[in-house]
Amino acid sequence: MNLTYFLFFICIIVCTLIITYWAAKRSNTASHFYTAAGSLTGIQNGMAISGDFISAASFLGMVGAIALNGYDGFLYSIGFLVSYLVVMLLIAEPVHHLGKYSLGDVLAVRFPDSQVRGMMAFGTFVISLLYMIPQLVAAGLLIRMLLAIDYSVSVLIIGGLMTVYVVFGGMIATSWVQIVKTIVLLSGTFLLALNVFSHFSWKFPALFEAVKQGTPLGNQFFLPGQLFDSPIELFSLQLALILGTAGLPHILIRLFTVKNKVEVRRSLLSAACIIGMFYIMTLILGLGTLAILGYDSLVAVDPSGNLAAPLLARQVGGDFMLAFISAIAFTTIVAVVAGLVISATTAFSHDLYHHILKKGRSTEKEQLRAARLSAFTIGIISTLFALKLENINVTFLVSLTFIVAASSIFPVLFLTIYWRKFNKAGVIAGMLTGLTVSLMMAVLGPHIMNPDDGWIDSAPIFPLYNPGIVAIPLGFLGAIAGSLLSKHKAADIESFDRFQVHAQTGMDPGGEGK
Amino acid sequence: MRELTLILFERLCLLLVIAFVLTRTRGFRSLLYREFNMKMIIVHSIVFGIFGVVATMAGIVIDPQHGVLYSYVLSVEDSQYVVSLSLVPMVIAGLFGGPFVGLGAGIVSGAHLFLLGGMGSLADMIVNPLTGMLAGFTARFFSQERVISPFKALFIGVFPPILQMQLLLIFDATGEEAVSIVDTVGLPLVLSNALAIAIFTAMIALVLKEQENEAAQATKQALELVEEALPFMKKETEQEMAQGIANLLHERLDLAAVSIANQNEMLAYRGIEGSAPRYAFVEKSNLSSEVQETKTMQTAYSKSDMPYDSDDCPYGAAIMIPVIEAEEVVWLITFYFAKAQHIRPVETTLAEGLGQLMSHQLTTIAAERLTAHIRDAELRNLQAQINPHFLFNTLHLIASMSREDPAKARHITIQLAHFMRFNLRIVSKSLVDLNKEMEHVHAYTSIIRERFSGRLKVIFNYPEPLPELELPPSTIQPLIENCIQHGLKNKFTEGMVWVNIQCIEKQWLIVVRDNGCGFSEEVLEIVTKKPINLDSNGGTGLYNVNKRLTSLLGKSAALHIRNLEGKGGEVFFYVPMKPSNREGGSHDSSNDC
């Protein structure tokens, strides 16, 4: 590790901690801790959402995937981007109107029952943990490769940092590190992209020519079929990506941090714009890596392609640029992980502790203490997991998260908001089906059951790499069947209408729903 | 690399010294208030632009052959790269002047860099305005704070040099040269720039704090002054008030001169002898007519605007403050300064605050006076009401006497007429001579004596001629009435009432005493404090008298009540010796009759 790296590394840590310090001074009520007390503007929140969403997997993985697989690599971006339409059109405003701190609140408006709340908290926790582990693992690998520190040390650093972050800063600190990260990441990638262009005298054709020279795929690079050979796999993946965001708790709770529905729309629009711009930039960086660096030198350093962006930076800007891009990647990871910890913390301390254990009678001070304690615990748990899972495939865990979210939380939320006959049994059935089916299929699928290098050394029971196409409909089916078959009477029409008005307009018409 | 960092720090320290001097100028301070207009934007852009040019010159040059050249940058060859420090002024311009000042300054400084030439000139030309503008938007983003905290500035300051390096790489992507330059200067630049920007922000925060303290001081001073001016504002005549206040202001504010005028004339002036502003200014000067029109404070910065009608004005600047009462400008207070530069924001703030406070104070005083007048009028009306029983009894008395003793009947009729005429006068006068008051008492006692013929004796004991005293009308008569109605109620023979007036220790003591039953305990306690209704009539008498005495003659004239050792009660009060010595006697000005 040379001096430049080290100073930059320290610099970023100091800068981010300073933000936490400012925020920690203000975050004294439960409302501040969980939702930044509705103090963010739509655009700030949009930046924070993109900061939450663009993970290290996106930044590093996407550039690598494009560099290695061409067109198919870019297909991930499309799915991620389109998923925001689903969030905005179907989920965002009702969730904003109904929820206060957590997704459990949203369900509780319609089904005021501790089982429902507990189920949602459980789902939130599982998904957050699932998503957190690959981030930490990726971070550990990245830091190890960049700074040549030991894997466990780097995981411990990241895990410790994010825990400090959330414990002291709560949502505001998290929001701010995400906003800062988004700005830094966007401008950094933008400048790097410009740098790439300037190498080709600002001419697209020259870039494409060089890409064709650089990749072993030749012309095939710009055509589909490198990564997904069967259309079913492709469709299944895209389905999970598109519906998955609408079930990601750490994105959805960001909708509580703004004041009104106009700001909700604004935040989603700006998030989609930022994410879209970002993916275009990753495309250019991916192409640039091939054009400037070449396929062979990329694969020689790292066969997974994850280091494409840093390597490109070193090639065009020396160690200075490399340090800068690494610092960006580091902040990216901290920001995403902090966001995930917040959502898991909320599920724990707000839903489990405040509403279920204390029956809604705990003081704000107690809640805050519980929140900090659970943030601390969750930080430790996920760090321990990440330490154990050094060799797991990161992309697999990321896509698994999206599949789980799309088949458990998304169906339950969707049906709660829109289906008149949905009931408590449906919530529990849907959530359980979604979680078990998607997790089972992943375990029984070729990622884990694989005769070549899988954990379980046998032929996969479930043939698809991406089980979304099966798991998501099953999640919906479970929820519907649960409601129709159970003895619970569906809520009467009037109360559903009241709920609908509340969900769509934000005006609380009262009634027994509350 | 370490040497380079140290050199950059040294150069930046030089810049910080220049920046410190800049913060001492009045123009820079106006930036902190975020009052932006086109002119200020241009002026500040140029100032910061020049600052940027100086910063560029304080930079260093990297030569591919000779390495780093540490001389100041005056000219550059094509192959050399200028390590400019101009980003520090650009960030500062952006943070405090907003995006437009940042952009403007960046254009000036960027143009200079472009003209200097050298290898990174294009990148430098772009990075300067860009940085200024981005810093401006960042400052807007953190707009809840007037001055960005040094920590935030440190964080922000990290990025401009990174941008500079990136742009250098983008525009000079020719090969290894740019990369090696970035490797050499990148980190030192980041470190030094970020720190310099943070230190500068801290410096500005200090200036601002200083300024706020000044303002707080001014406010405090204004409040104190008004408090001290209060006694003057209650003075009888306008001249007295104005003279007192002018002296006070001149003394306390260290002004070259102070003048106070009303709508018609100059009331007071303190300053250089023999050069008082002519009264004519009220019509003539632009300043005063503007003040009267807008009813706000105005400032004259040049002799031609001064409230003088000739050229012999010894002062260079003035602040004119209106004092407003009931929407009308009643006074114009003018502060004179030897030079326009002597008017600091503190002075204007203070002047404005003073004017407002005095206006409020005047309104309050006027309101107080109004209530006092109203209360007085109410009291007089109350006392003017003649007890109807007394009137009927007296008329019966006259009727019965008119046959037996027409002469006496006539006498009593005349006394009744006196008595009633006096009562009418009560309404119109707040104070009367003791002479008149005693006439009233005599008229009353002669009627009453006749009515209780033989049963009652009234003994007067006072010096002749009567001292020159002023009393609220109908003060003594109710006391006697009280003796007869309550003290002697059950006394059917030898009822006695004494009325004594004597001088004790430069005060006149007036005593009314009887030999009746005295006051009961509970009555003794409350009788002067609130009106009581013991019987059908009377009850309020002592209360009313006490109230009029205290409100017109001050607290020292309050009624004292006690029971005598033998039998009977006594009511007495003191009146100050000379009528003109009445303390606080403000409500009685005799012009209201």
Image (spheres, rainbow, N blue to C red):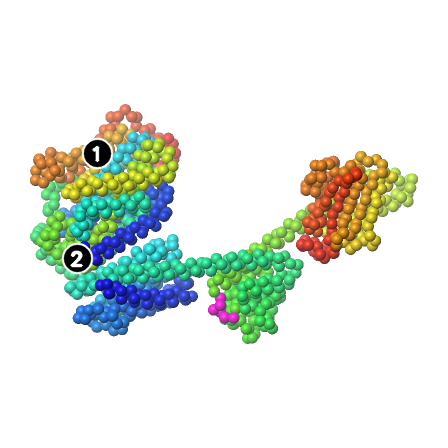
Q: Nearer the viewer, residue B191 or A3?
A: A3
Residue A355 % position (x, y): 34, 34
Q: Chain of mark 2?
A: A
Q: Is residue B406 left or right of residue A130?
A: right
Residue lying furthest right in this view? B404
Q: Secondary structure at mark 1?
A: helix
Q: What residue range appears in magenta?
A: B338-343
- Pointer 1 with pointer 2, Cβ within 8 A: no
Q: Nearer the viewer, residue B546 or B98?
A: B546
Report the disc number at residue A314: 2
Q: Is residue B488 left or right of residue B238?
A: right
Q: Is residue B210 left or right of residue B276?
A: left
Determine whether B493 is above or below B247 in the image.
above
Seen at 83% across and 39% down, the residue is B495
Within 10 Å of disc 1 (Cα), the crowding (few <14, some 14-19, many 20+) is many
Determine whether B198 is above or below A144 in the image.
below
